[in-house]
Image (cartoon, grey):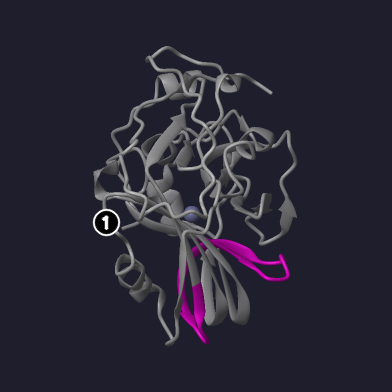
Amino acid sequence: MKPFLKLIVFSLLLSLSSCIKQSEKSTKPAEAPQDNSIASTNDYTLNEDTFYQYSIWFAFVNKVFDGDLTVEELKKHGDVGLGSFDFLDGELIMLDGIPYRIRENGEISVGQDKDEIVYADAAFFNKEDSFPIEETVKFGDLPSKLDAKKKSPHYFYVYKIHGSFKHIKLGGVPKVKRPFKDGLDVLIPNRPVFEAENISGTLVGFYCPDFIGHINAKGHHFHFISDDKKWGGHVMDFESSLTLEVQFDTKTKYEFDLPKSEEFENVNLSKKFQYN
Ligand SMILES: [Zn+2]
């Protein structure tokens, strides 16, 4: 595994009252260095309150499509996650510690330890609370249902949402080759789309506050995998058919690794693109 720069850019250790982290949380002792020195990956263990990210959203938008984070390394940062594999050779969803790769033709496989990732969000999921959404809900209405249960829009949240869907529309990613021509602002609107009816499965989602800026995508971002693990991708739209069971976990620390590559060192971050 290649080493890469570990930059702790900001760590939002907000002194939360115990009402956010109930006794279900077993927090590992933080071993992060106390200064701003560059640490190797092995120098500390990520706290279970941490939202982990690899690369930054606007580098991904601006064609930094050759990452150096391995699946093996990603699994050290969480048991749920989402993102994309190197060269956009598949969307990533990690559930219960298993990282699935969904290629542009819809083929699904389990990512191998040496496979590389270009962008990812990950976390150790510790269910803090859960609630059902008992009515049929459309994807566009989901954020307001989730927002109603957030203690504050200024924290980070991780979701596992299980249920059945009358209809669901997912996006894949088109594999790219060097020289990279288009950024996500062009590729995403033209992404491969998969649709299914009457299917059950799990959404894995991450929420970032508006203040996240260009570092990550603001708001909610969901990937889906079916219960039979044969179908998945980036969630674009759905209509649920039965109760959705929502589990969530508040995160108050945020850490990321930046790609160690000339491409990243020289990227022009001028193109802007957000899902919402
Ligand atoms: Zn996505």
Q: Position of residue 271 (x, y in %)?
A: 31, 39
Characterize the local packing of mark 1: few (<14), some (14-19) or many (20 or more) Cα atoms within 10 angstroms.
few
**Residue at 54% over, 46% down:** 26
Report whether residue 245 is seen: yes
Query: Is 191 contained in the magenta span?
Result: no
Q: Looking at the picture, does residue 51 appear above or below residue 226? A: above
For the record, the magenta segment spans: 223-245
- Residue visible at 42% across and 42% down? 183
Return the residue nearer the eye: 243 or 85: 243
Task: Considering the whole magenta stretch, tell me its main secondary structure.
Answer: strand
Residue under label 1: 152
Q: In the shown orientation, is residue 72 left or right of residue 66?
A: right
| Between 59 and 11, the one nearer to me in the picture | 11
- Quick one: quadrant of the C terminus? bottom left
| Placement of 46 over or under 264, stated as above or below | below
Which of the two residues, 167 or 121, is positioned nearer the viewer here? 121
Image location (x, y in percent) of residue 9: 36, 26
Where the N terminus falls, by quadrant? top right
Q: Residue at x 64, y 33 (%)?
A: 73
Mark 1, secondary structure of its residue: loop
The three-letter code of the residue at mark 1 reads Ser
Q: Is residue 56 visible?
A: no
Q: Is residue 266 left or right of residue 160?
A: left
x and y, in percent, of residue 98 in the image? 69, 51
Q: Residue 27's spot in the image, x, y percent?
A: 51, 41
117 relative position to 20: left or right: right
Outermost top residue: 37
